[in-house]
Image (spheres, rainbow, N blue to C red):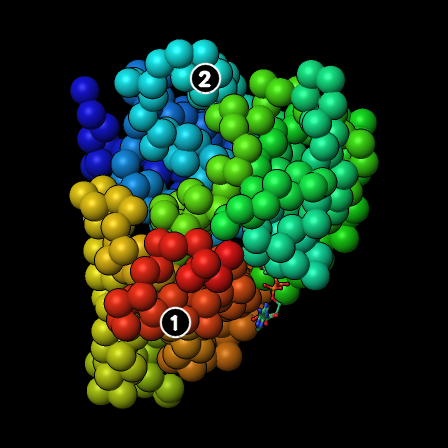
Amino acid sequence: MSLNTEDLLETCRELKDIFAKRAAKYDAEAIFPVENYENLRKAGMMGLMVPESHGGMGANFYQYTRAAGIFAQGCASTAVSFNMHNIVMGALAEVDLSSVEGRFGQIMKNFQDWAFAEAMSGKVFGAALTEPNVGFHPGSLSTTYKKVDGGYLLNGKKSFVSMSGYADYYVVAAVPEVQPGGEIPVVSWLVLPKDDPGIEIEEMWNTMGMRATVSNNMKLKDVFVPRSRLFLGFEGLVLQKLANEPHFVVGGFTACYFGVIEAIFNFTVEHQKRRNMAGSDIPLIKNEMIQTRMGEMSVLVEAARQLVYHAANLVVTNRGERETNAAIHRAKYFVGEIGPQIASLAIRACGGGTISKHLPMERYYRDIRCCGLMPAKSDECLWYVGKQAFGIDINKHSETYW
Ligand SMILES: Cc1cc2nc3c(=O)[nH]c(=O)nc-3n(C[C@H](O)[C@H](O)[C@H](O)COP(=O)(O)OP(=O)(O)OC[C@H]3O[C@@H](n4cnc5c(N)ncnc54)[C@H](O)[C@@H]3O)c2cc1C
């Protein structure tokens, strides 16, 4: 039986209300939302993207987009960090192994079965791709692995590792010590358990926004990874996957940050409904200027929604096609650039009281500013979409920004 969207969203709304009550504390202290993850676990959400054949909910990308947006309305840091888990599970769930045979097929199946079983038992997967001085550009990584007896030895440094110290596993992107040559550099994902003695977390996370993602630096020193923990059992998967199907890595963030935009809009409506015009008992919302400002915000929010949902639906119907990938980047650009603008309009409309820490608006303002920094960054989106407009093949690795 396929997942009912409305049932899923109802559960997400219940969780969102719980998350919203805790968000200010997590943000103020820049601590990981451990209790929220307990709620996610209890609701079976670690299996949100795990196929039904493996006991999960089997959400499609549109359903995921809606769910992530609702979580973010309660706590953006929870949604964005949880997005890393769903990037891993979603990317894995999209690999259809039903017709793959032979020894190699069995290796892939074993990996998939293991990862899904871990998620279904409540384990959380983080993703460590970004590096200092490299950013999120897997084509230029300096974290390396070399083959040793039974597996690989990993060395390097990662930055912005969300859920650092909390995720049960990290999916780490790395390159072989010696590149074999060829058109596309070999970049592989290797899965590390969090308690490996070679992993050192540098606790330095103290940021303007998205504070509860706890995205610290991570040092990797001679970390042994058994062969069975090479993602899907083969090297060189990363760039190919990102070039052809960038929706999880790009669109997942868009979904979360669109949720912040919705929270800003809803807050602004409710805040203004409660106020009267200065020195009178006439409701503020009767004021033409206030109505016009709300109209301006409404147009922007709806435009963002259409771009985000359209792109998500295209992933369901035409995954990996160039127009789908362009749509994913149009939505990311718009949410990343229009989000801070909407937050600014909201503060202008609601007034000085909204910069107080006892209201969520100032947190939304800081959090939404981070959207354009996350893959794909705003300029990268425009570059990519512009190429598509000229008919350049954006699914070709050499034409991407990775
Ligand atoms: C809250 C949060 C959570 C995150 N969680 C994770 C996570 O869990 N895992 C993970 O792997 N990453 C994570 N990231 C990192 C994210 O994916 C990005 O990689 C990161 O935000 C980009 O960092 P950067 O701006 O330093 O990098 P860069 O991409 O290096 O950019 C630095 C600057 O240089 C410019 N620049 C870079 N290359 C070029 C070029 N070739 N030509 C011209 N200009 C260039 C950029 O435009 C930018 O202005 C997270 C980020 C945030 C904000």
- Label 2 neighbourhood size at 10 Å, few (<14), some (14-19), many (20+)? few
Q: Residue at x 36, y 29 (%)?
A: 95
Q: In this view, does 90 lie to the left or right of 309?
A: right
Q: Residue 96: give x, y in percent of width and height.
A: 31, 26
Numbered marks: total: 2
Q: Mark 2 points at which residue?
A: 104
Q: Looking at the image, is mark 2 or mark 1 nearer the viewer?
A: 2
Quarter holding ligand 1: bottom right
Q: Nearer the viewer, residue 396 or 314?
A: 396
The N terminus - image quarter: top left
Q: Which residue is drawn at 41% across and 36% down?
A: 91
Q: Which of 46 and 142 is in front in this view?
A: 142
Q: Quadrant of residue 385?
A: bottom left
Return the mark for residue 382.
1
- Identity of the amino acid at label 1? Leu
Q: Which of 50 and 262 is in front in this view?
A: 50
Q: Residue 374: give x, y in percent of width and height.
A: 51, 59
- Identity of the amino acid at label 2? Phe
Eyeballing the image, is 264 above or below 106? below
Regarding residue 285, the answer to whether it shows in the image is no
